Image (cartoon, helix red, strand yellow):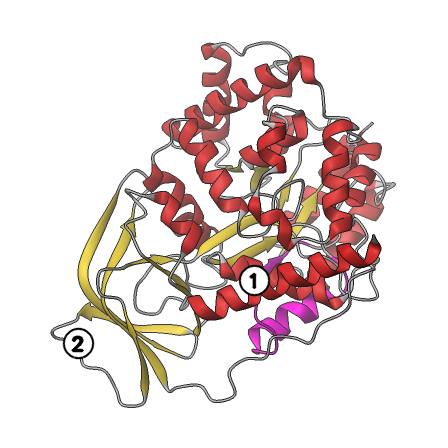
Amino acid sequence: MQRYIIRAFTLLLLAGVSACQPQAELAPQAVKPSGYAVHGVNVVELTRTDGSVRNNQTILVEGDRITAVGDTASLSVPENYQHIDGTGKYLLAGLAEMHGHVPPASGFGQYPDRYLDDVLFMYVANGVTTVRGMLGYPHQLQLKQDIADGKRIGPTLYLAGPSFNGNSIESPKQATQRVIDQRDEGWDLLKVHPGLTLAEYQAMAKTARDANMEFGGHVPTDVGLEEALKAGQRTIDHLDGYLEAIDATNRAASKYEIDYLVALSLRHNVAVVPTQALWATIIGAADKEALKTYPEIKYVPQQVRDGWFSYLTEPTLGYFNQDNAMVQQQNRQRLIKALYDGGVPMIFGTDAPQLFSVPGFSAMHEIRMLRDAGIPTAGILHSATVAAGEYFASKDKFGAIAEGQRADFILLNENPLITPDTLAKNAGVMVAGQWLDRATIDARLADIAKAYTASADTEQ
């Protein structure tokens, strides 16, 4: 079953879009200013449990770094800087998608370049400035470098290599060699999928520890949650393995059992990437009619949409079980709230692009789901900013508005701590020192929607 699930997930992610025509890359600005200055803005600061605002600040940016943050009245601005009026607005550090995907480029599967560029843009258009890519393809390391060099517009990428799963690994020796190969190739972490035997998983984990390679993702059935945590798995994504550990996939979990899972997680210093909204869709607990009306689905190709709609009537992943869907969802919501309350690190992720999980836009659905679980807005935003920066602290500084941090931030019309829906329509995004104003974002999104509407009409 686990091998089948891997194939099904891959097919879902790689639904063909061959009718779309490739599009030229969105070129960076021909002449860039010496730097940027955002004036008079209110800076949102976050802790794990609370948030606050520093009023009337000026933020200076040069290259891909924030170079100064201070009171507008006292901070001087160098000449030849582009000025951005933040009066009455709010500045939030860019969001991180800690379980995201980057589709294959042209030549890999059926995807043309158009869709790849559009996915990258949709992330940043919605303020997602960092993506931890959780399914590696050979072209992605070059893509990561192209974005860093300014050749493409996109979020900063941290990439897991091709996954360790029941189809890709056939022995502990092969698992060991795959870790060494991915370390030498330059991948940032290892991705665990279902299907590994305990011996294969243990070989991967030992070699990864010796190679200073982090690993995260699913929990294979033969391994189980406790063994995965003992082995040092850095993140458990989708809360995978948690309900299975207490045999509560078809019944309500007790408080004692949930408390046990919290204590187990704390003991092994693991972080969770819940992806609650996407998982509600996968297990059949989401409102199907509401899914169909998501306005952002116009930004994905018709073939992808068709696959998503088909899933609602003919699910193929093996997770869908309407009889148990609601009890599983209730358990998952209770569990994530207990993990958060207990102090287990939570890192934001949506698993886009996936079923009705459109890159960038999916953040709003995940925020809403986590709020419904009882997690405060400040805690959710912290998981998408500060917590992600802490996770990658050995690689870079990002996730906060402070000197020396990567210049990733979102300009918002309202205070997101009070009105989180303001994230759905930002006033502009800075991604690694490149400014995208609202007019630029809207124009490109309109172009994406028009292209996929035209391709759908052509197919008909």
- The answer to which of 319 and 416 lies nearer the viewer is 416
Q: Is residue 342 above or below residue 75?
A: above
> Marks 1 and 2: which is nearer the front?
1
Magenta span of residues: 137-160
Quick check: 132 left or right of 260? Answer: right
- How many residues crowd mark 2 within 10 Å: few (<14), some (14–19), many (20+)? some
Residue at 61% over, 14% down: 248
| Residue furthest left in the image | 73
Q: Is residue 194 visible?
A: no
Q: Is residue 339 magenta?
A: no
Residue ID for mark 1: 445
Q: Is residue 156 magenta?
A: yes
Quarter residue 56 falls in: bottom left
Residue at 87% over, 41% down: 170
Residue at 27% over, 52% down: 45
Quarter residue 428 falls in: bottom left
Q: Is residue 185 visible?
A: yes
| Kind of residue indicated by mark 1 | Leu
Q: Is residue 52 above or below residue 310?
A: below
Which secondary structure lies at badge 2? loop
> Which of the marked residues, 1 or 2, is nearer the chain's N terminus?
2
Q: Percent position (x, y) of residue 387?
A: 42, 48
| Number of numbered discs on residues | 2
| Kind of residue indicated by mark 2 | Leu
Residue ID for mark 2: 75
Which secondary structure lies at badge 1? helix
- The answer to which of 339 and 314 lies nearer the viewer is 314
Q: Percent position (x, y) of residue 135?
A: 70, 51
Instruction: Assign the N terminus to one quadrant of the image.
Output: top right
Q: Percent position (x, y) of residue 100?
A: 61, 50
